[in-house]
Amino acid sequence: MSEKFNKAAETKRWIAGAIVFVILGLVGALSNSYIVSLMTIVLLFTFMGQSWNLMLGIGGQLSIGHALFVGLGAYSVGVLYLKYGISPWIGLLAGMVIAGSVGAVLAWLSFRFEVHGIYFALLTIAAAEFARIMFSGWEFVGAMQGLFFPAPTGEVDISMLRGGARFYYFVALALAAIGIAGTELISRSYLGYVWRAMRDDDEAARALGVRTFRHKILVISISAASAAAGGGILALVQGAIFPDSIMGMGISVDVLIGPVVGGLGTAFGPLVGSLAAIPLNHLMGALGDSLGIPGLNNIAYGVILISVVWFLPDGIWPAVVRGYAAIKGSLFARPLKLRKAEE
Amino acid sequence: MLSRRRAYVCRNAAGASQSPSERVSIEISIFTCFIQGSLMLSLWLNVVASGILMGLVYGLVALGLTIIFGVMRVVNFAHGEMVVFGVYIGYWSVRMWEVPIIAAAALAAAVMFVFGYFLEKLIVKRFVNSPHHYQFIVFIGLSLLFSGILLVAFGPDPRPTASQLSFRTVSIGILTLDLARLQAAGVAGLLIVMLGAYLKYSSFGRSLRAAANNRLGGLIVGLIIPRIYAITFGIGAACAGVAGALISPLFDAQPYLAMDFTLLAFVTVIVGGLGSFGGALLGGLTIGVAEAVAALMFSPSMKTALPYALLIIILIFRPRGFFGVREV
Amino acid sequence: MTTLLDVKNLTRSFGGLVAVNDVSFALAKGQITALIGPNGAGKTTCFNLVAGALKPTSGQVFFQGQSIEGAPPENVCRMGIARTFQIVRPMRDMSVLENAMVGAFSWTRNVSEARSTAYESLESVGLVGKANARTDQLTMSDRKMLEVAKALSTRPKLLLLDEVMAGLRPTEAVSVVQVLRKLAESGLTILLVEHVMRIVMEVASTVVVLHHGAKIAEGCPKDVVADPQVLESYLGAGFHA
């Protein structure tokens, strides 16, 4: 009977997800250009946040250097398109392969000696910084001067992934939808079960026959590859690539803030978190600029991160779901819903 | 330090002040070498010596981080901001009261100890037993908060702190060293030794080490763990602050320095082994010398990348650093 | 009687301490064997050697004639040896059912197949009614049974149980005994590590007694309890019934 109940809940979730994306589609079609460009960024970070979320929230591996993968994706698209005229589609693919391999190598290096937790997290940061400095000195990829895409003509060219702001909005929307649906599908597949087991207790998972070493490498390279796809689109949206802005710590923080604020390990968390945090960051940034006080956005981000971990360690989304279930429960006197069923 | 400086100047696009000391001192040393004839040897000795001096300061920064990790098992992601607080304390006290840098360092130690103590009491202590990723996120939050505060308080532009001290040099045999750097290294070295002795021989040091070894055991034998943690965090912050004040004549005071220092401290402690006292010192010296040598041998941009390359190599061959502590 | 597991001259030392010293025994298919001994006898070390969690200093373990030397725990499990932990280790953020599903993924990638296997495992330990509960809602004895169910989902040929009955009330222990009997009847081979002798006597067909890392007795429970050496190891020298 619980089987049936789960099926129904699942269908409901998919429908709810579809409705959310239809609304987001309408937002893209009807809003003004400021909102469209802001929401493009929100959706891109939803997708990249989802990739990070897959790695920590489901796979249990903490990265604080996701900018590395984002940057590799951006540079792959940029270099192939600008130096050789190759379509960004190929660039995205190349970026995903490169980032996925780099992620796999990093993971292999680290987990080979069962180095994990803090050490792995620090390794990701070091690798990202190393890459940033290398790219800053690498003339071929523009060094500190960066790479610039030609200004968009407004004409949509799907084969070259070029178009105006609204076009990129829908690209980002599609990507976010793929990210959320993909995470949902992965977490329902055997990989989801095995990864969550490995996240909760590595040794116990191994005793149950889970080959955690290869699964860690797998989850990290999938996460890296999808972050790279997001990075490639981000580069196209921004129209320029600078090592400090695409591979810096700032990007790593932007990637993790969505899932942390929204809800780790949940499918909708990164969307909710990005929707809450990124516009606020822009608002504070704009406010700071107009008042001549830089740093307000940093303070806002800092306060958000600390207070979320302090007061809502599971994030906003699970709290919302819990609240909804409680209200519904009290209205219809349904039996207590279990935590797993929420997400 | 040249390229580090270059990196953030470019990042800022302000392009301002590229003054300082290092370049002057390297140029002076190159010049002296020509005169003395024993060209390479002297040049190398100078570079290695200045690397060691800088390494001692890095060692002090890393020591703060490693003490906090060793005792509390948390990684202070906001360490660089604490160094920069120290830089500003050094900058303002030298500018306003024209006190010697040693006095500024003492002031930084006091202020940052109190700051660290209350930061632990108010915020950090709530997360000491949280999973690693929560701790990391809280500290990333603190780091953003502090860097935001620094930006609001001082603005993004670098403040050149070049004083008389910045340009004075001392000659010892064929070595020509910056006075400021020598002073900073001397104080840092002295503090490291004092702190080491304090941890080893004082009764508080003993209980601190006991708490680091076995938290539960410490509780059982009646150690007041919350107090130890707060003091530990205070000591860690004070190390960062003093190091910041000491190098204030060498660096332009600037909020964006913080990230560089945090990362440098991370690299240093991982190279030495997270949680190890000797490791922090050895890591600091290794990084200091490696940076200086790399600046001489390769391009300046290589120099900034070198610590990370070194780190990756170390992690491949000795994943827990020279003297790593096992994770709990 | 066919031998499923053959332990040959197993030795493991930690520094100067020899925790397991030249221990040999064999497990017969479809039977329950108990490894007993007083505290510090080397039971758990011996258990971990068989489970592949520790590497022996010398000696070998053969499972169905094949050495498990150097095999990491996940491969040992995939060969058909499942284990439980003395201190229960449920996956904290997964439901009881999901916990029981994990083991099935060692032989299938089909989620619904894993789910039905998990239900079977939960059924055989009597936890099926709590399939959707959170693990922190379970009682201690339920948690112990969940450990067994998790292991059963891997479809083992040999089940290694590390002190499943420690810390249980007598009535709970009785129900565990019934579960184990049923499992053995269905053809599963079981190696129990137990401290509590009385329970072991009820279920085990063979008992291996360790003392100071060495095997001091082996045989059917009745003979073993009569062995003066065994009594001495448990109760101290000078005690003779």
Image (cartoon, rainbow, N blue to C red):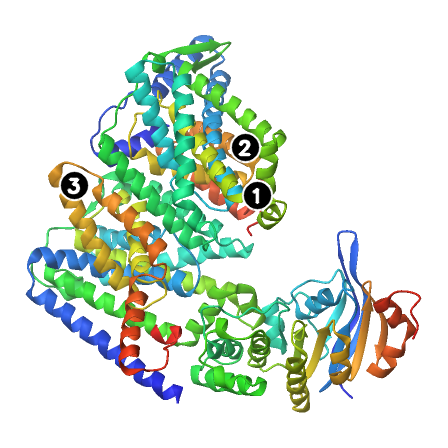
Q: Earlier in the sequence, mark 2 or mark 1?
A: 1
- At numbered mark 2, what does the secondary structure look like: helix, strand or loop? helix
Q: What label sits on residue A288 in the rendered view? A: 3
Residue C150 location (% of width, % of height):
55, 77
| B173 relative to A227, above or below | above
Classify the position of the N terminus of chain B by image quarter: top left
CA–CA distance in space, label 3 to label 2? 42 Å
Q: What label sits on residue B282 in the rendered view? A: 2
| A341 relative to A124, above or below | below
Residue B78 location (% of width, % of height):
38, 40
CA–CA distance in space, label 2 to label 1? 20 Å
In front of the other: C92 or A337: A337
At a point 46% along the width and 52% down the height, the residue shown is A120
Residue B122 location (% of width, % of height):
39, 43
The image quadrant of residue C152 is bottom right
Count of numbered circles on the image: 3
Which of discs 3 and 2 lies nearer the camera? The answer is 3
At a point 62% along the width and 48% down the height, the residue shown is B220
- At numbered mark 1, what does the secondary structure look like: helix, strand or loop? helix
- At numbered mark 3, what does the secondary structure look like: helix, strand or loop? helix
